[in-house]
């Protein structure tokens, strides 16, 4: 695994292997902090926009955006989720001869006709049949297994994929991150800035207006509306670049703090 010291020894703080992982991956899943922390969620959206523009197959695993971040997406249907849901019953338990369903405004009922056996609740498994991801990018997650604990029935297929772990924390508490990734990038700045560096290392041209707005939102949230001691001269330079790309600081502050 890439460790913190190795990552920080490079001028940009981003190991080149991280960009290589993204370049080589076709199917990518992005998992932000499950508590919908604004810096993490906004950065996940920025990464989602950018990777889509690079013609990657991208899924964003998120329960839902906070109301104050919904201005960052055109509609609720914009974010893609795994769509192929599978219900599995072992042949050793029962032999199903017919399947039909009825759908009404309140629910969907699936009916099974059995030629043999008896199906109990514990015999049935449920999962998504999405293509196994080439890469998972986590943002603001310190413990991967714990973050997926309540989702394993649906997303258990994610556990064996290689992970790019992006997190931010103070140097004194770096041990809080389980360092679960093939590459771990943990720095004491916003997740938006870290993720942005990952994207702009190849080219600034990859940053379009929508991801720029998301990245700037993450920075504003992390710095508590630009009022905290977390601000640095480099942060102001980054903000300037994002505004030149079309991000509207006034719109972001209005939505985050109205």
Image (cartoon, helix red, strand yellow):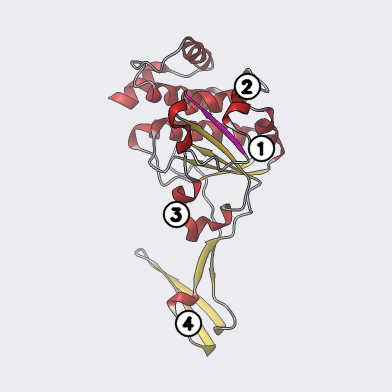
| Magenta stretch in the rendered image | 183-188
Q: Which of marks 3 and 2 is nearer the N terminus?
A: 2
Label 2 sits on residue: 9
Q: Which of marks 4 and 1 is in front?
A: 4
Q: Nearer the viewer, mark 2 or mark 4?
A: 2
The residue positioned farthest toward the bottom in the image shown: 116
Q: Which of marks 4 and 1 is nearer the N terminus?
A: 1
The residue positioned farthest toward the left in the image shown: 258
Say which mark, if any, is on residue 149.
3
Q: Nearer the viewer, mark 2 or mark 1?
A: 2
- Up/down of 210 relative to 237, above or below: below
Instruction: State the separation of the CA atoms marked 3 and 2.
Output: 34 Å
Instruction: State the separation of the CA atoms marked 3 and 1.
Output: 30 Å
Label 1 sits on residue: 55
Q: Nearer the viewer, mark 3 or mark 1?
A: 3
x then y, percent, for residue 112: 49, 80
Prevailing secondary structure class for the magenta stretch in the rendered image? strand
Residue 55 located left or right of residue 4: right
Look at the numbered disc 1 and give the secondary structure of its residue: loop
Label 4 sits on residue: 119
x then y, percent, for residue 146: 45, 50
């Amino acid at each position: 695994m890439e460790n913190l010291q190795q990552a920080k020894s490079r001028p940009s703080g981003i190991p080149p292997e991280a960009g290589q992982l993204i370049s080589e991956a076709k199917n990518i899943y992005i998992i932000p902090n499950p508590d919908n922390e604004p810096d993490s969620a906004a950065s996940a959206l920025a990464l989602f926009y950018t990777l889509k523009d690079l013609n990657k197959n991208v899924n964003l695993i998120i329960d839902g955006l906070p109301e104050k971040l919904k201005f960052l997406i055109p509609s609720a249907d914009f974010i893609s989720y795994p769509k192929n849901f599978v219900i599995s019953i072992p042949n050793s338990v029962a032999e199903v001869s017919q399947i039909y369903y009825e759908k009404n405004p309140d629910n969907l009922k699936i009916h099974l006709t059995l030629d043999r056996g008896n199906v109990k609740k514990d015999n049935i498994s449920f999962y998504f049949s999405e293509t196994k991801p080439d890469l998972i990018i986590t943002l603001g997650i310190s413990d991967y297994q714990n973050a997926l604990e309540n989702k394993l029935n649906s997303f258990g297929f994610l556990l064996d994929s290689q992970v790019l772990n992006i997190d931010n924390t103070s140097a004194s508490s770096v041990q809080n991150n389980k360092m679960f990734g093939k590459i771990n990038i943990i720095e004491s700045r916003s997740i938006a800035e870290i993720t942005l560096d990952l994207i702009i290392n190849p080219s600034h041209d990859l940053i379009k207006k929508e991801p720029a707005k998301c990245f700037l939102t993450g920075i504003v949230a992390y710095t508590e509306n630009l009022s905290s001691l977390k601000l640095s001269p480099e942060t102001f330079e980054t903000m300037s670049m994002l505004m030149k790309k079309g991000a509207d600081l006034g719109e972001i502050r209005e939505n985050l703090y109205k």
